Amino acid sequence: MRPSREVHWYLDSQTMFVKSLSHGLGANWASQGQLHDFLANLLVKNSSPAGEWHVYQYYSQAMKGNRVGTSRSDDELFEVYATRGGSAGTVKILAAIRPVARKKTCNLSITGLSGVKVKGPTVRIRTYRFDGPNVSTAVGAPVNLGTFKHTTKNDQVSLENY
């Protein structure tokens, strides 16, 4: 995933609950008219979806299966959430970089491929980009950046400068 700033907010606040197997609700810190106008930053004034809407939709529809262990980057500018088992041989990953990092690349390693029955020297990875420059901009669905083959080594695949 190549996410927008909204994806990172979602991951940062929601994964704290999910990783600890706790129930929780993200807060809406808007004030006055904005508190109710934008449905917690999911919609814009004309009821079109904002970037965060698409993140929640992807999370609810695609992130099926069992939660797998993940860790954020040492500098805490990168966060990731992943599931496996929605369908055979698949892992779904939602990853984001904090807005304060601006444009930054990260390295992402997916280990334990044999645990999801991935065999062979390559895997196919489909990447989506979630747009959303700010909470008041309507955006379309995530952009499919395509599916590409990546080489596996030692039961893992590494994505560098992602």
Image: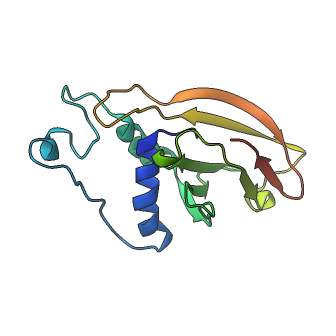
The residue under the point 51% across, 45% down is: 62
**What x and y, as percent, mark residue 76?**
55, 61
Seen from the viewer's position, the closer of residues 115 and 76 is: 76
Q: Is residue 123 above or below residue 14?
A: above
Q: How many marks?
A: 0
Quadrant in the rendering for residue 28 = bottom left
- Left or right: residue 81 compared with residue 16: right
- In this view, which residue lies farthest toward the left? 32
| Residue at 30 percent of width and 59 percent of height | 26
Q: Is residue 125 above or below residue 14?
A: above
Instruction: Please state which of residues 12 and 119 is positioned toward the viewer in this rendering.
Output: 12
Give the image quarter of residue 121: top right
**Position of 98 compared to 106: left or right?**
left
Question: Which of the 4 image quadrants contains residue 52?
Answer: top left
Q: Quadrant of the C terminus?
A: top right
Quick one: 134 or 110, which is closer to the camera?
134
Q: Residue drawn 20% across and 39% down?
A: 38
Q: In which quadrant will I find the N terminus? A: top right
Percent across and percent down for residue 132 are 41, 33
Q: Position of residue 133 (x, y in %)?
A: 40, 32
38 versus 29 height, above or below: above
- Colour logic: rainbow
> Does residue 157 appear left or right of residue 74 in this picture?
right
